Amino acid sequence: MFTATVETFFMISVLFALAILLKRFIPFLRKIIIPNSILAGFLGFLFGPNLLNLMKIDVDFLGKIIYHLMAIGFIALALRNVEKNNQKSYLGAGIIIVGTYLFQGILGVSIGFIINLFDKNFSPAIGFMLPLGFGQGPGQAYSIGHQWEILGLHSGSSIGLAIAAAGFGWATIGGLIVLNWLLIKWKKSHQRTIIEKKALEVKDYEFADMDGMTIQMVIIGIVYLITFGLLQFIEYILSPLGNLGHTFSTVLWGFHFVIGAIVAMIFKNIYDKLKEKNIAKENYLNNFLLQRIAGMVFDFMVTASISAVVLAKIKQEFWGIFILTFSAGLLTYFFVMMLTKKIFIKNEVENRVAFFGMLTGTISTGMALLREVDPALESGAAENLVFGSGISMAIGIPLIAILNLPALAISTGKNIFNLYGLALMLLYGLLLFVIGKIFLKKSKKN
């Protein structure tokens, strides 16, 4: 394990060094907006087993690293002191996330039925994987795909990974096109310019008993330990519920970064109370150092995420998946743009870029795109991603139940269950639309 960790660190460091050198010596890369982390990830994808096979990449180990880095990054963000005027409506963010899941699911199943008319081997149930691969990432898509493969779906796990890989393509390449288009638009209108990254002069944050950075890492480690203990306890409580309890606890483990951020906020509030009562003498939490930790973690996480994508062998379903994912990627951008314009009055562009990156790739690609327009993460869009994801867990519980219907369709061979799932998503989408209208009316009044 130790050797794999060191090798992975060296590999990602080399990829970053190559990305920096390419941007230094290739004028085209200097002119366009492309985060070093995404460029390094593309290099990992190129040099890895997918194409040139010049670099040994342990995809499973990278997946574990991505999982833990995601939690560490958002715990660091949640421990910061954030001004109240920077806090956004997390309910609105949750509505965007679940609304996009529903949109992708409805679109995917509808297209799946159309493809099925011409190709009977293409199951409409594949359409249900679209919000999993795009919105949840390769882990969830692979997990559900593998379960459906056991039930009878041809190459289910490979299909899940292929949809997730296509989502990464939209989140990175599509996201970069969006970023550069916005830059051109802002320059023409003179309304906005990209915030330039600048060097910061900071005072020494070392304390008498411990280095400042070490203290931040110790606190993050304690919060993460509490998070793991809490999730294991919940899993134990849910175990008597059988498959339903297992499914729900699996989803909670998938959203561990949200639970970690919530625990971090509670920890911070308790710590603030102790300082007010003069029980805690020293202010160990430091925004600058926490921001640096989060920035480093997100950079490594994005590079690892793109490098870990594996091209699956899906010859039989290739064209169906291509049509499905191409349509979804294009329409998801316009859907997210419509929702963010309605819900966010300020910093709409930052939220649009971040949510598009997350709802086609993962939260790490959303963060990578966001940091190009909001380097210091001051717009509140980062918090919207993580805490909106937390709220979406509650709002999206019916979607977990709906996922049982395509499983029934696959196991019984009856497409009527896929139709039932499509109808339920439409009904729930209508209900969410009504809730969203009420939310917008209250927001305008406030």
Image (cartoon, rainbow, N blue to C red):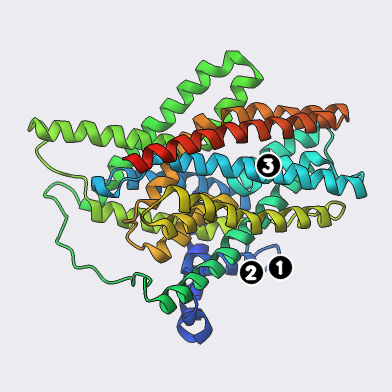
Q: Amino acid at mark 1?
A: Leu
- Sort mark 1 into few (<14), some (14-19) or many (20+) by Cα contacts within 10 Å: few
Q: Residue at x 47, y 61 (%)?
A: 369
- Foreground mark, 3 or 2? 3
Label 2, residues with CA under 10 Å away: few <14, some 14-19, many ≥20: some
> Where the C terminus falls, by quadrant?
top left
User: Residue 403 location, x and y as percent?
Assistant: 69, 31
Q: Earlier in the sequence, mark 3 or mark 2?
A: 2
**Vertical order, 362 against 186 (above or below):** above
Q: What residue is rendered at 29% in x and 50% in y? A: 86
Labelled pair 1, 2 in contact (Cβ < 8 Å): yes
Tag shown at residue 51: 1
To which quarter of the image does residue 204 belong?
Answer: bottom left
Give the amino acid at mark 2: Phe
Q: Residue at 83% across / 57% down in the picture?
A: 319
In whole angstroms, how far apart are the C-alphas of marks 1 and 2? 6 Å
Label 1 to label 3: alpha-carbon separation: 31 Å
Marks 3 and 2 sit apart, C-alpha to C-alpha, by 34 Å
Asked if 96 appears above or below 422 in the picture, the reply is below
User: Which residue in the structure is indicated by mark 2?
Assistant: 47
Specify the label residue 105 is tagged with. Answer: 3
**Disc 1 versus disc 3: nearer the observer:** 3
| Secondary structure at numbered mark 1 | loop
